[in-house]
Amino acid sequence: MTARVRSLAGSSIVHVLFAFLAMGGWAVFANRLHPMPRPLVAGVVQGILSACLTLFLKSVVEALSKRFSGFTALWAPPLIACLGSTGILVTIHALSGTPEILKTIAVPLLVSTSYAAIYNYSISGGRR
């Protein structure tokens, strides 16, 4: 990999922008059967939420991981992160009038929870 590609791959701005575009695009798709501008509003809302969650998820998992020990340290931080993300996503989509809330948040939650679980496992060293 060239230094430029490595730099882009490690950039928080690139990760946040990718989350905005990918998950915002998913939200537009998930709400495509509803009249405009509802799919676009859902896409912008989900894009912003995904960008923010991407920015803070790593820090949250790191902080939570330090608060638990043993086997609990493997499952509690990703579960808490997932529940927190779910609450935020459902609340904000409900307030913004997203028609297909469950379809809209399914993929972003799957991706963020998978990331949280894998990252938590990697920083915990697989401790039990």
Image (cartoon, helix red, strand yellow):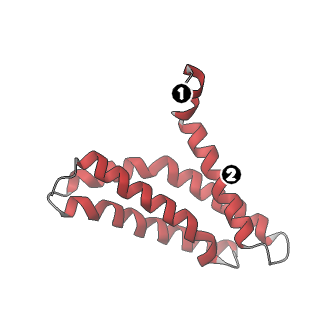
Which label lies toward us, 2 or 1? 1
* Residue at x-position 56% and y-position 43%: 15
* Residue at x-position 29% and y-position 55%: 64
Quarter holding the C terminus?
bottom left
For numbered disc 2, what is the local secondary structure? helix
**Badge 2 local density, few (<14 within 10 Å), some, or many (20+)?**
some
Q: Is 113 positioned to the left or the right of 91 in the image?
A: left
The amino acid sitting under disc 2 is Leu
Residues 125 and 109: in front is 125
For numbered disc 1, what is the local secondary structure? helix
- Does residue 31 appear in this view? yes
- Does residue 94 appear in this view? no
Q: Where is residue 10 in the image (x, y as percent from the top left)?
A: 51, 33
* Residue at x-position 48% and y-position 71%: 87
**Badge 1 local density, few (<14 within 10 Å), some, or many (20+)?**
few
Residue labelled with disc 1: 6
Q: In which quarter of the image is residue 34?
A: bottom right
Residue furthest right as drawn: 36
Q: Which of marks 2 and 1 is nearer the N terminus?
A: 1
Q: Position of residue 39 (x, y in %)?
A: 77, 69
Residue labelled with disc 2: 21
* Residue at x-position 21% and y-position 55%: 67
Whole-Å distance between the Cαs marked 2 and 1?
Answer: 20 Å
Q: Quadrant of residue 49?
A: bottom right
Q: Is 9 positioned to the left or the right of 71 in the image?
A: right
Residue furthest top as drawn: 3
Q: Where is residue 18 in the image (x, y as percent from the top left)?
A: 63, 46
